[in-house]
């Protein structure tokens, strides 16, 4: 086998080995039952119609990342939500994009992607009345919880 073939095999192995750490999972988060109380939840707020992280919310993400590292958390749930203004399907996509924004920042700070579960919920269920023109900022959020 030539040196080029061996190098190509080594490179391919490195790429496949790194892939699980880069990719997050999509789906429902597991509920924590029993055991030690984990830190959180941490709530990251967003502007109306946006999945861009607010500079003011970085402190919350930084704190969640530090707690996850300190406690060697195995799974982190990112539950995305949107308010009730606009099309429900668009709000579902927005809730997913918000959770993905938080996931990207957490990965940038050293959390392995395979520890992250993105659970987009679409429109939040809150005390907000249907048909109201002003949405609650609490509904435009991603909640970070440690699953176990």
Image: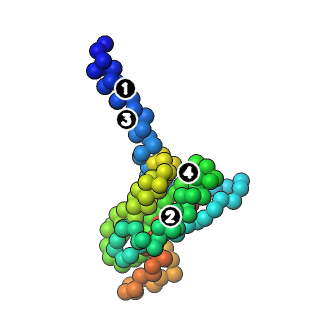
Secondary structure at numbered mark 4: loop
Q: Nearer the viewer, mark 3 or mark 4?
A: 3
Q: CA distance from mark 2 to mark 1?
A: 35 Å
Any part of residue 33 in sight: yes
- Residue 148: percent from the left, percent from the top? 62, 52
Q: Name the one closer to the observer, 17 or 88.
A: 17
Q: Residue 62: x and y, percent?
A: 52, 62
Judging by the rendered image, the residue that carries numbered circle 4 is: 75
**Image side of residue 1 versus residue 28, left or right:** left
Q: Label 2: few (<14), some or many (≥20) within 10 Å? A: many
Which residue position holds label 2?
A: 61
Q: Which residue is tagged 3? A: 15
The earlier-in-sequence mark between 1 and 3 is: 1
Residue at x 36% of width, y 67% of height: 51
Give the class, few, some or many, for how many residues have Cα within 10 Å of label 3's Cα (few <14, many ≥20): few
Q: Nearer the viewer's eye, disc 2 or disc 4?
A: 2
Image marks 3 and 4: residues in contact by CB distance under 8 Å: no
Residue marked by disc 1: 10
| Residue 146 visible in this rendered orientation of the protein | no
- Pick whichever of labels 2 and 3 is earlier in the sequence: 3
| 114 vs 141: above or below | above
């Amino acid at each position: 086998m030539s040196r080029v073939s061996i190098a190509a095999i080594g490179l391919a192995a490195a790429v496949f080995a790194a892939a699980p750490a880069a990719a997050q999972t999509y789906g429902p988060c597991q509920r924590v039952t029993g055991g030690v109380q984990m830190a959180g939840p941490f709530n990251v707020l967003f502007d109306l119609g946006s999945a861009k992280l607010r500079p003011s919310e970085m402190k919350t993400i930084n704190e969640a990342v530090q707690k996850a590292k300190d406690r060697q958390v195995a799974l982190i749930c990112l539950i995305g939500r949107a308010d009730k203004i606009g099309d429900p399907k668009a709000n579902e996509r927005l809730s997913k994009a918000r959770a993905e924004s938080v996931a990207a920042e957490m990965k940038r700070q050293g959390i392995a992607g395979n520890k992250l579960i993105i659970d987009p919920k679409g429109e939040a269920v809150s005390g907000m009345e249907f048909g109201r023109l002003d949405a609650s900022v609490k509904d435009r959020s991603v909640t970070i919880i440690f699953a176990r």
